[in-house]
Image (cartoon, rainbow, N blue to C red):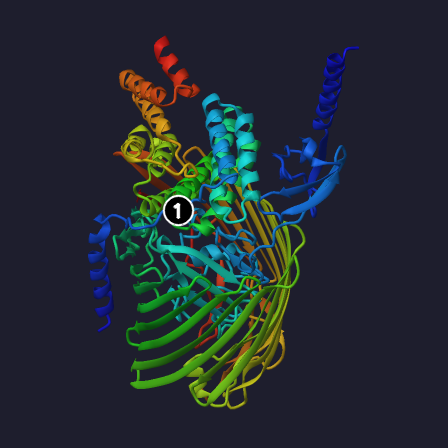
Amino acid sequence: MKPIAALVILLALTAGAIAAQETSFIEGTILDRETKEPLPAFVLVAGGSGISADGRGRFKIALPLSAGPRIRLTVWLIGYRIKEIEAEAGTSVKVELDLEPLAVQEVTVTADAVVSDEKNPKTVSLTKMEVYTLPGAAADPLYASHILPGVNSPPDASSLLIRGGSPDEVGFYFDGIRIAHPFLSESLHESYFSVFDNQVVDRFSVATSGFHPKYGDSLSGVMDIAAKDVPAGSEGGLGLSVLGLNSYVAFPLKGVGGFVGSYDRGFSDILVRLNSRGGGREFQTEHAFGKFLVRLGAANQVRIYGMADRYRYSQSAGTAFDVSTENDLAALSWTCAPRKNFAFKALVARTTYDMSFDQPGTVRVESRDTGFQTRLDAVLDLGRHYLEAGAESASRTLRTSILDPVSADSAFRGSGLGFYVQDKFRLSGRTYIHLGGRASSFEASGRRWGIDPRLSAAFLLTKKDILRASAGLYHQFGDVSTLGQNPGLKPKASAHFALSYDRIAENFDIRISLYDKEYRGLFLAGADGRLWNAGKGFARGAEFFLKRKAPSYEAVLVYNFLSSKRKENDIAALAPSPYEIPHSATGIFTWNVKNGSLGIRYSIASGRPYTPLAGKEWDEAAQSYEFVWAAPMSARYPFYQRLDLNGSLRVQAFGRMLVLYVGITNLLNSQNILRYDYGAEDGSRQDQQSIFGRSFFAGLYVPFF
Amino acid sequence: MKTKYSRILMSVFMIGGLGFWFSPSDVFPSVRFSQASSPLSKLVMEAKAKLREGVNRRDTEACKSARDQFLGAMLEDKTNKADLAYYVSLADYRLATFAFISGDTAEAGRMIAEGQQYLERALTSFPESGEFLALYGYLLGLEIALHPDRAIALGGKSAQSFGQAEAKEPANPRVHLLKGVYWLYVPEAFGGGPDTALASLEKAEALFAKETVTDPMKPDWGKDEAFLYIGLVYKAKNDPAKARAMFEKTLALNPDFGWARSELASLDKK
C-alpha cells in the first residue's frame, strides 16, 4: 500500500471514529417530583446545544465529541427550579424537577378566606361576573356571597350569618374603610340589599375564620370589598331594568390619574305592577359613587372617595310606616411606595348614617351614627418574609331622638385604637406561615383591651392540593350604646380553629373544611337587666364546596353543616344558637348558550331555632295576658327553600352590543318564614314572611368599551 | 344638611364625566434589551432568524428550534434573563398559532400558558414595557379559543393589557399590530372585526415606516405582517384590489413569506 493511500484510509477511519463519537447521545425523561407528571422541560448540554422535551417529558440529544464521557446538563421549565446534573454519555437519565418556590405573598394561607381575586386562584372564588349571572343574587355582592361555604344565611335576607355567628359579628370593609351600615334597608331581624354597587367592585373576599389581623372588632367574619381602580382605557355602561336605571363610567385622565364612578336609581313601581303585587308597599333607592385617582410622580397616589346611598320604604297596608336612610362616605387615601419593596397607605374617612322611622300616631324616631376613622398600613417585602403592620383609630357618635310618643334624646360616644403586625414567611419548601397579632382597645365607659394572637399555615401537598390550618383569638367590643349603658362590659371573645383542604384544578375545584369556634365573654343579661360578660357558646361545623367548569356549563354545589349553642342576652343556659342553621345547601347550574347564558339555582336551609309561646295567663291586676314561654330555642322555623332562574343574551343593535337579561326569583313562590311575632296584647302569632315572593324582572345593559 | 353630601357627590360625578374625553398618558420608558455581545448576541440573532424562517415556512420544527435557542440563551445569560423571556414567549405565540391551525388544542394551550408565564417573568423586570404587555394581551385573547366560557373575563383582561400597552409605548408599532390582529378575530358583536382592526393596523404600519432598529438584539419583527393583516382586512371587506396591493407590499419586504404568497395566489385564482 502506498503511503498516501494508507494515510487516506487512516484519515477515513479516524473521521469515521469521530463521526461515531459525534453521534453519541444522552436521553431521558423529565418529571414533576411531586405529581410524577411528565414535563416538557428544556435541557441544555454544557458547552453545546439544548432541546425541549416532548409532551411525554422525553428528550434525546446528540452530543459533540468535546462533551467527553461525562456531561453536564441544565434542566429547566418555567415555574420549576433549575436543576443541574451530571450523566454518562450514551445513557438514559430520569430527572425530577421541584416547583419553584412561590413568593410568599402569592400563597393564600388564611384557612378559609374565600377570595374572588382572579390573580389568586388557589382558593374558592366568586368573580364579579358571577355576581351578575348568579340567579337570585340581584347583582349584589352580599346576596351572591350566600353561596360561599361557611355562609349559613338563609337565602332571603342580605345579612351574613358566618359559621353560626350573629350578623353583627361581621365586619365590612370597602377599599380599607370600615362600613358600619352596609345595608340599604337595615333592621333588627333582617337587612336587605347592600350599599355596594357591583359595577364598581373589582373583587371581594369573605373570610370565615383565620382572618388577617388588620381586621379588628369582628368576632365571626369579614367581607372585604375592593373598589375598581382606574383602568388603562375608558369604559362604562348604562342599564335600564324594571328596578330602575344604573350607570357606570371609568376613565384615565392624562397626566393626572383617573376617575371611577357610578350612579343608580331604583324604584318599585314597575316591579310591583309587573308582578301584580299591590300591598301598599313601595321603595325608592339612589346611589352615587365617585373615586378620583391623582398620581403624584411614580411613587405617590392619592385617592378621593365619595359615596352616597338613599333609601325610602313606605308601607300603607296593614301597619303603616315610613323608613328612610341616608348613608354617606367621604374618604381620602395616600399610597406611597418610596422603595420597590416598601409601601404604606394612609387613610382618613368619615361616615354618616341617618335613619328616620315614622309609624304615625305610634312612634317616630330619628338617629344619626357618625364615624371617623384613620388608618396607616405598611408592607415590607423581604423576599422570604413579607411583613405587614399598621395602626388605626376610630370614633363613633350615636345620637337618637325619640319624637313620638314621648320626647327623649340620647347620645353615646366611643373611640377605639388598634395595632397589628403580621409576618408571612416560608417555613420550608412547601409550608407557608402567617404569624401575627393584634391589640385593640375601645373607650366608651372605661377603656378595654383585647389582645389577639393569630397563626395560619398552608401546606402545598402538590401544585393542586393545599392543606390549610389556622388558630386565632378574636375580640369584639359591642356598639357604643350597649357599652355606654353597661359600664364595665369587656369585649366578647372567640377562639377559631379551622382546617381545610382545597383541590384546585383548572376546571374543577373542591374544598372541604372543618372548624370549631369557642365563644367566651358573650353579653348576658343579669337579673337587673344589665349586661355582663357571663355568656359563652360554640359553633362547630363542616363544609363542602364543589365547582365544575366546562365550555358549555358551570356547576356549583355547596353544603354546610353547623352545630351551635349560646348562652347570651336573656338566655341564661346554653341553648341552640338563634343563628344555628344545621343544614344548608345550594346547587347552581349555568348553561353557556350562544351569546348568553341560562342559570338555575336551588337553595334549601333548615329553619333557625326560636323560643315558642307555650301559653298565656290573664293577669287580672294588669288587665293583660302574661305570656308563658317554652324552653329557650326549643322549636325551629320551617325550612327555607327557593328556586331562582335567570338568563342573559348579548345582541348587536344600533352598532353596539346590548345585554338583555331576565329572571324569576322564587319560582316556587315558597312562603319562607323569617320569624314569628307575637301580638303584645293577646299573644296571637303573626308570620313574618320573606319579602321575596315570586317575582319576574327584566333589564337591558349597554356596555361602552 | 342630610342631602349636602349627595349633592356634592352628584356634582363630582357630573364633572368627572367630562374627563371621559381625555386620552391615556403616554409618558413611559421603553425596555432595555440586553446589550449585544457575543456569543450570546450571536445565539439570539441566529434564533431570531430561525424564528422568522419558521414563520415564513409555517415550520413548527424551525420555531421549536428557535425557541430552544432562546431558552439556551436565557440559561447562558448571567445578567438579565427577562428580555430573553420575551423572545421565548414570541416563539410560543407562533407555535400556539400553528397548533391551532393543525387542530392540536392541547399543544396550543400549553404554548399559550407557557408564553404567558415567560411574559409575566419579563414584566416583573420591565413592568413599563408596552410591547411585553401587548403580547401578553394577545395571548390572553388566544386563550378565549380554548375557553369560550371565559370569553368575557379573558376579553376584559386582554383589552386591559392592550390599553396599558398603548399607554406605556404608544409609538411602538408591534403594540398596535398585535392589537389590530386581536381585534380582527374578535366578533363584531363584541366590538371587533375588520373595521376596528384596520385602525390599529394602519397605525402600526405608519409607525413601522418610522421605526429604525439598530440594535440586533431588539425586536424588529412585524413590518411585513402589518401589510399582510391589512391585506386580510381588505379581503374580509371584499376589496381584492387593496388586498392584493397589501400582499404585494408584504412580499416586497419579505419574499419568502409563505402565507402572503398563498393569499396572493388565492386572489389570482378568483
Look at the image and tell me whether residue A135 can be seen.
no
* Image location (x, y in percent) of residue B15: 20, 57
Please identify the residue farthest to the right as the structure is shown.
A1
Please identify the residue farthest to the front as the structure is shown.
A3
* Image location (x, y in percent) of residue B226: 34, 29
Q: Quadrant of the N terminus of chain A?
A: top right
Please identify the residue farthest to the top as the structure is shown.
B269
Say which residue appears at 50% left-offset and 35% top-offset. Answer: B42
| Residue where numbered disc 1 is placed | B31
Question: Of helix, strand and loop, which one carries label 1?
Answer: loop
Look at the image and tell me whether residue A672 can be seen.
yes
Label 1 resides on the chain identified as B
Q: In this view, does A674 lie to the left or right of A279?
A: right
- Front-lying residue, A604 or A239: A239
**A79 to A211, vertically: above or below:** above
Q: Is residue B65 left or right of residue B197?
A: right
Q: In which quarter of the image is the C terminus of chain A?
A: top left
Q: How crowded is mark 1: few (under 14 residues within 10 Å), some or many (20 or more)?
A: some
Examine the image and state in which quarter residue B261 appears: top left
- Front-lying residue, A287 or A178: A178
**A670 to A190, vertically: above or below:** above
Examine the image and state in which quarter residue A606 appears: bottom right
* Image location (x, y in percent) of residue A466: 63, 55
Q: Identify the amino acid type marked 1.
A: Val
